[in-house]
């Protein structure tokens, strides 16, 4: 099975605080740098599960882009798309309780265009689109065209709504229309994203509820117990979609 993902490949700076932030002072922290971005994370997990994975997106022609591409490729992910501009970088502040706040610079990922796509890239079994790719042009139009190409070849499509605050900033109506135009088979969202967008799409909904687990098309599924919460950001979806059925596994990303 070949799963394509479309969206961001960023350089993630994860800052896990050892205690409360000391205003205008120093705070002990554990800091890690590596590849990230929702689409890249899903592709990495697909490859880790033993399936074929292809990431599609624009990445930066800089040191951050080189590092992110090189590391993602080590998971066995095929990387497709133009290289140019400055790569996206995300700084995630993680509290001692595992809650996170992100400062996001998406950089070159926003610049993917329809003309950059190769139809051969979208010959796949499943296409997963990050909601970040549906927020702004020109990448929004590229994502919609990618969905058309993938669907023509018989692929199933999933969308993760990604971020309630970014949806509001980019325009709820425009974002919702883009998701609707993709006609996704599966929609991933957390409770805030569901509240902002609303369940106006005819799809299987996977509602992420953090420590309370998830709701799979209305069926509640509890979270697995853990000894310690490290970082809620890194608890993301690794989706494996069969030709005739949908299987969803909640895991930590390979970097986590």
Image: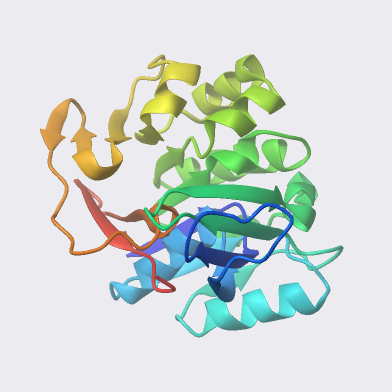
Q: Residue at x 77, y 36 (%)?
A: 137
Going by the image, does 58 lie left or right of 42? right
Q: How many marks?
A: 0
Q: Which one is in front, 85 or 184?
A: 85
Residue located 41% across and 14% down the image: 200
**Snapshot quadrant of residue 117:** bottom right
Residue 88: percent from left, percent from top: 72, 59
User: In percent of the image, x 64 and y 67: which residue is there?
Assistant: 80
Where residue 237 appears, x then y in whole percent? Answer: 35, 53
Q: Judge whether residue 122 can be spotted in this image.
A: no
Q: Could you tell me which quadrant the N terminus lies in?
A: bottom left
Q: Quadrant of the C terminus?
A: bottom left
169 above or below 228? Answer: above
Left or right of 188? Residue 219 is: left
Q: Give percent across and percent down for residue 178.
A: 59, 26
Q: Quadrant of residue 89?
A: bottom right
x, y percentage for residue 73? Answer: 54, 81
In the picture, measured across the screen, residue 199 lies left or right of residue 109, that is left
**Color encoding of the figure:** rainbow
* Left or right side of 2 for 58: right
Q: Is residue 232 in view from this perspective?
A: yes
Residue in the foreground of this view, choosing between 237 and 104:
104
């Amino acid at each position: 099975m070949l799963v394509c993902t479309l969206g961001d490949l960023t350089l993630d700076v994860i800052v896990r605080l050892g205690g409360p932030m000391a205003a205008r002072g120093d705070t002990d922290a554990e800091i890690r740098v590596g590849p990230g971005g929702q689409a890249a994370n899903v592709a990495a997990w697909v490859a880790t599960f033993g399936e074929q994975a292809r990431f599609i997106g624009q990445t930066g022609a800089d040191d951050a882009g080189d590092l992110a591409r090189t590391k993602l490729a080590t998971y066995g992910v095929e990387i497709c798309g133009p290289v140019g501009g400055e790569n996206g970088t995300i700084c995630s502040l993680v509290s001692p309780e595992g809650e996170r706040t992100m400062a996001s610079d998406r950089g070159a990922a926003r610049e993917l265009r329809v003309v950059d796509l190769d139809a051969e890239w979208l010959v796949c079994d499943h296409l997963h689109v990050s909601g970040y790719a549906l927020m702004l042009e020109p990448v929004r139009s590229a994502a919609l065209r990618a969905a058309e190409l993938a669907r023509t070849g018989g692929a199933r499509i999933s969308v993760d709504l990604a971020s309630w605050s970014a949806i509001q900033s980019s325009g709820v109506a425009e974002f919702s229309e883009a998701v609707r135009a993709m006609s996704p088979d599966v929609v991933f969202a957390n409770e805030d994203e569901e509240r902002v967008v609303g369940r106006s799409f005819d799809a299987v909904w996977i509602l992420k509820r953090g420590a309370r687990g998830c709701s799979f098309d209305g069926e509640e599924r509890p979270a697995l117990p853990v000894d310690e919460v490290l970082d809620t950001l890194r608890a993301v979806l690794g989706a494996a979609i069969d030709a005739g059925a949908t299987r969803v596994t909640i895991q930590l990303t390979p970097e986590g």
